[in-house]
Amino acid sequence: MQRVKLTKYNQKKVIAEAITVLKEGGLVIYPTETCYGIGADSTNQEAIDKLLTYKTKRQDKPISVAVTDAKMAAKYVHINKTAKNIYDNFLPGPITVVSKSKHKFARGVESSQGTQGIRIPDHSFVLNLVRAFKKPITATSANASYKKTPYTINDIFSNLSTKQKKMVGLIIDAGRLPKRKPSTIVDTTLDTVHILREGGLDLPYPKLFIAHALEDTEQFVEQLYEKLGTRLGKKTVVFLLQGDLGAGKTYFTKYLAKKLGVKDVVVSPTFTICCEYKGRIGRKPITLQHIDTYRLYAPSEIDALQPKEIFRAPNVVVIEWANKVSEYIEPYLRSAVVIKIRIAAPDEQTRHFEYEIEK
């Protein structure tokens, strides 16, 4: 294992050394604009097998790769109009673009669904390295799976076994990197943008949370709760839910009620239209209003629920089948924090939550 200090004067020499290791099927630790990554020839099966052993406990997670530009990416993945928009407007940068793969990578790189994450790092050394190598290299973080994000070489090696350390052929040490969030992961395979992981760059597209089991909905609620922060308990917070029958709208509300400290059993308000529950945000008492508009014939029927009281701050309001009344209640939403959520159920267990926080 060789370790070199990267400076602005020795980049060509370091790149030549890195290419030698990569061509031999070795692993290279290198700096990026987000954290230290570990590179391997993404088309070399021996190299990828070594990388997967190094990372440990991947559980079939795909591995993103770094390319120089959209032209190189197009050799390996299908770039549709949605992906092209990301490439043209946001790259290079801390974004991983997921597209349908052309299956030119070694086994273990792309996802089990046949998709591939592509990075164009905003880091001149990495771009020069990939350009000189003439093939994509892996762009996964250099830490072992589930260990701390590596901003220094010590962050990496303090959590590795002797066996893992011996797998690394070259360490390119650029000192302590600035602490930045990981790349934002966007899925463009369905001709629309879905944000699978939010990173340092906030994109103006709906976010997507995938719950692989109904119980994972609780993680989604936790994520939303964290994003809303101090707005909860100060402003009216309104969740507008849309989704087919059985998609999990009431299930979402049950977990939200649990997070809000509601002690009562949350039931579907299909026949009562509105259920009211007492809860707390911190020490502050709040009311959770759970509304189901499925049985309303006209949006104006919601007036019978005294909407001024329902939408009074700091109430939390959940509306199922929200599209039936969203335009009618718009005046009450102007001073509220509005979260639009569309729930899809591709199978009995999986739930896709596409969401936007408007204020």
Image: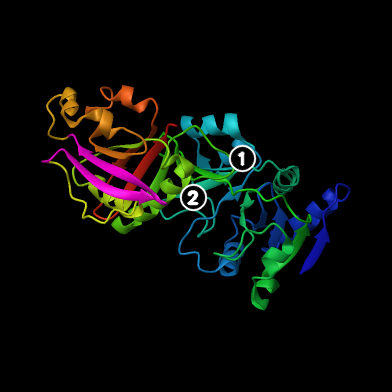
Quadrant in which the N terminus appears: bottom right
Nearer the observer, 284 or 80: 284
> Is residue 283 a member of the stretch shown in magenta?
yes
Q: Position of residue 100 (x, y in %)?
A: 45, 43
Q: Is residue 134 above or below residue 48?
A: above
Q: Quadrant of residue 233?
A: top left
**Is residue 138 rendered to the left or right of residue 224?**
right
Q: Residue furthest right?
A: 9
Q: Earlier in the sequence, mark 2 or mark 1?
A: 1
Q: Name which residue type carries label 1.
A: Met
Q: Is residue 65 above or below residue 313?
A: below
Task: Give the percent coordinates (x, y) of residue 307.
Answer: 24, 29
Q: CA distance from mark 2 to mark 1?
A: 14 Å
Secondary structure of the residue carrying numbered label 2: loop
Q: Which residue is the site of mark 2?
A: 103
Chief secondary structure of the magenta span? strand
What segment carries the magenta color? 271-293
The verdict on residue 69 being magenta is no
The image quadrant of residue 152 is bottom right
Residue 269 drawn at (x, y percent) = 16, 43
Tell me the residue that label 1 is attached to.
72
Mark 2 crowd level (few <14, some 14–19, many ≥20, 10 Å Cα) = some
Around disc 1, counting alpha carbons within 10 Å, would you say few (fewer than 14), some (14 to 19), or many (20 or more)? some
Q: Which mark is residue 167?
A: none
Residue at 54% across, 57% down:
106
Name the residue: 50% across, 68% down. 57
Q: Amino acid at mark 2?
A: His
* Label tally: 2
Q: What's the residue at 83%, 49% (across, down)? A: 11
